[in-house]
Amino acid sequence: MNPRLYPLAATIAIFLVAWVICVLQFPYMLSTRVVGNLLTDNAYLGIVAVGMTIVILSGGIDLSVGSVIAFAGVFISVMLRDSGLHPLVVFALLLVLTTAFGAAMGWLIHTLAMPPFIVTLAGMFLARGLAYMLTIDSVPINHGFYKFLNDAYWLMPGKGRLTLIGVVMLLTVAVGMVVAHRTKFGASVLALGGGEATARLMGVRVGATTVAIYAFSGFMAGLAGIVFSIYTSSGYPLATVGTELTAIAAVVIGGTLLTGGAGFVFGTLIGVLTMGLIQTFIVFDGTLSSWWTKIIIGILLLSFILLQKGLMRLSTVGQRA
Amino acid sequence: MTALLRITPQLLTLAALMAMVTLFFPGFLKIEFVDGRLVGPVMDILKRGAPVGLLAVGMTLVIATRGIDLSVGTVVAITGAVTAWAITNGYGLGGALVLALAAGAVAGIWNGCLVAIAGIQPIVATLILMTSGRGIAQLVTEGRILTFSHDGLAFFGSGDLLGIPVPALIWLATAIGVTLLMRRTALGLLVEAVGVNRAASALAGVNATVLLIAVYVASGLCAALAGIIATADIRGADANNAGLWLELDAILAVVIGGNSLLGGRFSIAAALLGALIIQTIDTGILLAGFPSEYNLVIKAALVLVILVLQSPNLAGHWYALRRTFGRQPAATTATAKGAKQ
């Protein structure tokens, strides 16, 4: 097997082992209801993690996504409350806004030659601040179209509900896989992650690619915001604080190298589902306290990073020999 | 003279901010002596700025080695939880302080080993503790907000010595102590050497591994001090909210202080001025009567301005501008060279 596939294989193996352990203890974990809820509850995280995967594959980082999701929720709810626009029009407006926001950050990173960490930190402050300026309250959404979106689900055998937002998440992952691994843009992203100088020598248009990467992440954050607003039927400026870190953790658990240049979008989906599975297990168990989620995710993160380090060392030793 | 020149932009920014706040809130600079202590908005900024100021001291050293410490906010929560736990379980004031500092040091050793020995990128290595740290803090407090009544410990948060709030004294003392340690010995130079090129400095005989670990331990200890202050101030440990997002403010303070995220030259004084600038914005917006919602947007705008000023791509343009408008080209190049040394 290709050594580049080892981290992905490890991720999938750990996910399957974890699920088997869960099922042995609670047979109901196998039911389609649990599967449906796993997809629905983690829909927004999965979508934003796809954008984050592309950013991390390019060797960058995007700290603004959590704030952008909160801004999206507030923007949608305030627009629906104060203007007579149809939700679909508001969605389109929002996606244009967040994509432009991401593109602006990418442009700044490229033109100022500053670390993405600090530029997207400014973006994080700005998006959260704009959300506060729109409203500081939790604004409910009572549009008929939202009721329709919320009730849209496909009843799986075993009465599990495959909701619309769950399907949107799976589709996003599929699109992300195609973009990252089957397009010229994806090749440019991976080349950038391997090293900017080499990418330039290969003929990658570094500036345009950087702008496109962060625009893509902005678009995904906007889409995640829409899904989150459907999931909660409200907009709240304090929502999804720290989601960017959960997304980064999901990407790392999914086997993508944080230095950039190597990884798979599909692994990110498994990373998100692994984290969701831990949470579901803790809910099922009932005696474990919620803080164990954080500690176990930390341990998972550590083991994956060490695993990647070990694999990298092995592969370089193999090349030297 | 060079040192003063180095922090001039930060001093000017702070002065301009204070002038602006005074414009909206005339009583801003007034300091009164009430009940044996100095009272006024400026003293309030010095006191409230203590956690970010302390974290900025450790963060400056970490960033000087081309690293970053994302975990300091959660270390504040952990050490705060340890402090409250120790005091409620009868370990006494001394025991609580020692345990809290030890917890901070252990967190630093953990981060330092991951970075220096395992060779993990600093941002990822410290992310591990950042995601799991709040869980550990909740484990210590068992998910509750641990409250205590102990006047000795509360003194660290709300007491005063010679009329000056204790938190302000602690961060000033820490800053002066660390600065002296760095600048009166070769330590500062060695830290900068590791930041510029770790491999080269190791070849030159610097023990880069130990130095890197030491830098993260320093950051952990600073976070422990901040945790003690935060806990003593509210007389309780809140594992969920103590030190929340303080790491970002601390990094921001260091960057406002003109320290490059790419490592190398550093200035603790400038980072502290950065922390004061952030706190002045926070307090000033409240005093001036602006809604606090504007706080983050103003911060974002400030970061953008600083990014533009620091951009290596634009450095050439600034240099050209200075030569054109400087009237004395020779003098400006001389000071620019002086500042670089």
Image (cartoon, coloured by chain):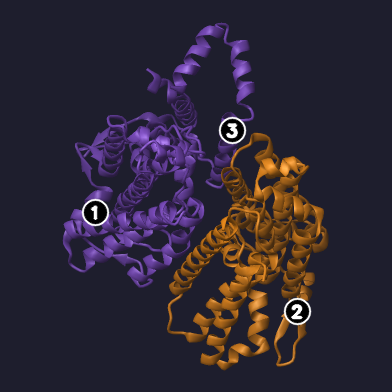
Chain colours: A orange, B purple
- Report which residue position mark 1 lands on: B154
Q: A8 and B161: which one is in front?
A: A8
Q: What kind of element bears circle 1?
A: helix
Badge 2 and badge 1 in a common chain: no
Nearer the camera: disc 3 or disc 1: 3
Q: Where is residue A42 in the image (x, y as percent from the top left)?
A: 64, 72
| Mark 1 residue crowding within 10 angstroms, few (<14) / some (14–19) / many (20+) | many
Which residue is found at the position 68% from the left and 39% from the top?
Answer: A110
The residue type indicated by label 1 comes to Ala
* Above or below for B159 versus B6: below
Q: Are marks 3 and 2 in contact (CB under 8 Å)?
A: no
- Report which residue position mark 3 lands on: B305
- Report which residue position mark 2 lands on: A151
Q: Position of residue B25 (x, y in %)?
A: 45, 32
* Above or below for B321 versus B263: above
Question: Does A65 sit left or right of B334 as displayed?
Answer: right
- Mark number displayed over residue A282: none
